[in-house]
Amino acid sequence: MDTVAFIFARGGSKGLPGKNTRILCGKPLIGWAIEQAREVSAIRRIIVSTDSEEIASTAIEYGAEVPFMRPRELAQDNSPEWKAWRHALQYMKESEGKLPDALVSIPTTAPLRDPIDIENCLTRFTKGDCDAVITITEAHRSPWFNMVKMKEDGTVGVVIPFNGKVFRRQDTPSVYDVTTAAYVVDPSFVLANESLFKGRVRAVQVPIERAIDIDSALDFEMAEFLMQRRIEKR
């Protein structure tokens, strides 16, 4: 299977400025993502889609390709990443005359992933009964038990009322958080649809310690602590 990895890393993060090149345990976040992708033998190429010259330069330094710069209109706070995926695939189609069999998106914000998580997603995808594979981890909250919403009268209630008595989260249906460890998608599906869950989506579960998604300074500090602990155990 012809597999190409993409790392989508825009330059204008507001939650954590400079996030994609921020140094975590001696290496920029995008460097971790590139090196993890390089450890997956099935991945033929690693391409970075960015609007930032700094990110592009760092990506090349770590061995990725940056054959195009992402248009600014696809790199805003409100720009759906799905459109960046489509832009990257359209570039490949126009420049190479064909699409890869699989697009692997490896976000920079999940540096604690293990290459095996990417490999497991690819293995699941090759079974051929889905349009996409995402990574998930067990949720700490349940919309039937300890997640609430505000009502019109100012009181709160559970997000989803549950029929019957519920005293523990374990008594409700299992729910999962979507993680950013990896995504594997059919390129033709991306170009023909407007969102991920329009298709048949399968999932690979990853342990919580590999599932942190960095969106804030606190997230970064937690990831840095766990990464340092991992390094010290080697």
Image (cartoon, rainbow, N blue to C red):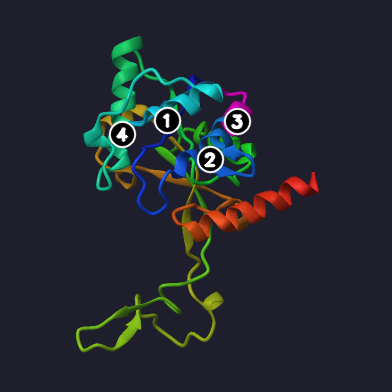
Question: Looking at the picture, how far across and down is residue 136, in whole percent?
Answer: 51, 53
Mark nearest the camera among 4 and 1 is 1
Mark nearest the camera among 2 and 3 is 2
Q: Which residue is mark 1?
A: 54
226 in relation to 95, above or below: below
Q: Which residue is mark 4?
A: 84
Name the residue type under label 3: Glu
Cα distance between the residues tagged 2 and 3? 10 Å
Specify which label sits upstream in the sequence, 1 or 3. 3
Mark 4, secondary structure of its residue: helix
Mark 1, secondary structure of its residue: helix
16 in relation to 106, above or below: below
Specify which label sits upstream in the sequence, 3 or 4. 3
At horizontal 46% and vertical 72% (from top left) the residue drawn is: 142
At horizontal 63% and vertical 41% (from top left) the residue drawn is: 114
Name the residue type under label 2: Leu
